[in-house]
Amino acid sequence: MPRKRKEQAAPRAKASGVIEGAGEIVEQQITETLEQNYMPYAMSVILSRAIPEIDGFKPAHRKLLYTMYKMGLLGQTRTKSANIVGQTMKLNPHGDAAIYDTMVRLSRGYEALLHPFVDSKGNFGKFYSRDMAWAASRYTEARLDDICKELFGDIDKDTVDFVDNYDNTLKEPTLLPASFPTVLVNANTGIAVGMASSICPFNLAEICQTTIALMRDPEHDIASTLQAPDFPGGGQIIYDAKQMHEIYRTGRGSFRVRSRYSYDKAANCIDVTQIPPTTTVEAIVEKVVDLVKQGKVKEVADIRDETGLDGMKITIDLKRGVEPDRLMQRLFKLTTLEDSFSCNFNVLIGGMPRVLGVGPLLQEWVAFRIECVRRRTYYDLSKKRDKLHLLKGLQAILLDIDKAVSIVRNTEEESEVVPNLMIGFGIDEIQAEFVAEIKLRHLNREYILKRTEETDQLEKDIAVLQAILDSKFKVKSIIIAELQTVAKQYGQPRRTMLIYSDELEEYTEEESVPDYPVHLFFTKEGYFKKITPQSLRMSGEQKLKEGDSVAQQIESSNAAELLFFTDRAQVYKAKASDFGDTKASVLGEYIPAKLGMDEGENALYMAVTKDHSGYMLFCFENGKVAKVELQSYATKTNRRKLLGAYSDKAPVAAILQLHEDSEVLFTNAQGRMLLVHTGAIQPKATRNTQGVAVMTLRKGGRLMQAVPYAEGMLMKPDRYRKNIPAIGALPTAEETAGEQITLS
């Protein structure tokens, strides 16, 4: 809906220089405003900046490479980068810094591409380093790499369309007629408006082989020839066949890449020499240092960046007795030494962004390349036909050279020479113009015979070219031959290794936690202690805050998981190993502060488990009881806080952990007691269930207590065993006198 605004007409001044209607407020639909102002910008970013096209390039890349080609840098000659940047500004008006950044990323020195397009000389920085800056453009030199011959080989034969540059002074290509699928060979990422593109690189030889196979058989199994992505920095891909198939099919998905390392036994250190493409050396070093400072990784003595002329290297010095492979498994989990690469094969096809799988993308490239080859063939065919046409005219005067000379000599006006030759020999204007331009020294039989000898060869060439144009099969055969040549000339062995995910030993946090017996204490005021049996035997009385008492004492182990239920129906999860061993003579850890509970929130009960078996029993003051499976509190991620741990519809009177069904003694405010076996209560998987009615309460009554029943607590337990819901029974005088029951 448009916003209602009061229209205020401005006085219409007649003075010169005043804009008529200025100051008027006009109602306008918000959608119309967006279409007029925002959509052109969004489309410009999508079509002219961030998303690559089928030739594998964004406009900035294409303008730079084409400028270098026109400068004659496809050879041995290098020139200063500043010169290239300056020339590129004739096509790309976005400033010298942006152009030089683009050039750096395409360079051999930067090491970001499997097959760099720019052969650089000087400091061009490194892709794997955040802080290693490249030198200014006035200090570095560059030329086009040899592989660019495959980009520009046919560009002057009308293989692609050309358009005017931004000021209509030069022409530039809309695409480059690449003879191999560059779109999948070199990595390409870009963020547009409302969409993005992230294309991982593949091995050149594998891509060429896959393209050839798809051209021969559209049903070809891509995974049989295209193993997996191949990164210039190497590393190891954790290969999941199902995951990779989905990426090949849809063009979307992610996979994990981990670093490669070696262990130097003599120096007791780990050398990391290859890292994932999504991280940097500095990020890894900083993260490991941070983990050491936090005490989460205690096995590392030192870490440093030893990158030099021999390449990238991160050295991790180990403490004595540390198992290197075990430590690396842990660092893979905690740092970007292992990272995910997200794929989004978003490419402009005919001016429209489309997300395609590997197969459809290669088919689109083949269609593009077929058009390039057909246009090149037609260009060659036209040139040869034109030449043959001229030679046919030259052949005509071979019969009587003297006649041709006589016609030229006897023509009074120059403008009549061509028409007279046309009449004299029966040739057209183009042929006559060609004959008329022959130099006097060439008016001999030998020259004319040599020129006309080409006629037979030209006719054969024209027949071959026409046959190519008439046959899609022959066009595809040419493309296949070109792909085979490219693969043979520029193909390289894979740099990235594959590790099969089902054979991979994954690190789990629990395995690194030392497991030993401990006694866990939890007090009514919310203090927690973890004491070893030996320390407990040597200790004296428990030190507690004034007025506090021990609510729970549990024998468990250091690897156990702790669940602290609070008075706000929340549960906070921790591990026993998160707490240090202590003594009875200290107060212990204050749980609300340690676990970062909300202000005023108090811990009511501590549950201890290793496998989340058993149940939690929540007893509410309204007499209802909820039996919840402990498994419902298990999480795959390390979440520390769960909301809705139990129902908050009524105040909770007691919380119990049950390892198996047993009897529980309920007591209400009037002293009535009810002995119930928990097997009679159905367990629920939902945490916030309100439970079932167990103890029937009179008006104003409430459930006060619930405790696990132990033999001997009651003299006549059968008296209190009833079918639920029940009101319970009052204790007899002799039971009260014997003080068998203790109510807290």
Image: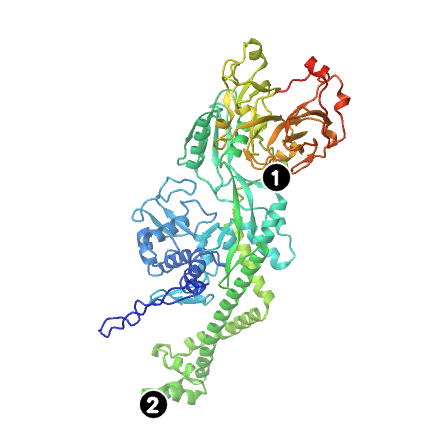
Query: Quadrant location of residue 740?
Result: top right
**Residue 216 horizontal side relative to residue 143, left or right:** right
| Earlier residue among tags 1 and 2 | 2
Number of labels in the image equals: 2
Figure coloring: rainbow
Query: Quadrant location of residue 573?
Result: top right
At label 2, the amino acid type is: Thr
At label 1, the amino acid type is: Tyr
Secondary element at tag 2: loop
Say which residue appears at 44% left-offset and 80% top-offset: 394
Camera-nearest residue between 477 and 38:
38
Image x and y of residue 441, in percent: 35, 77
Label at residue 231: none
Does residue 422 sit above or below 481 in this rendering? below
Does residue 252 sit above or below 595 in this rendering? below
Image x and y of residue 367, in percent: 55, 63
Residue 203 visible, this orientation? no
Say which residue appears at 52% left-offset and 44% top-offset: 341
**Residue 636 horizontal side relative to residue 127, left or right:** right
Camera-nearest residue between 557 and 429:
557
Camera-nearest residue between 77 and 64:
64
Q: CA distance from mark 1 to mark 2?
A: 87 Å
> Which residue in the structure is indicated by mark 1?
500
Label at residue 411: 2
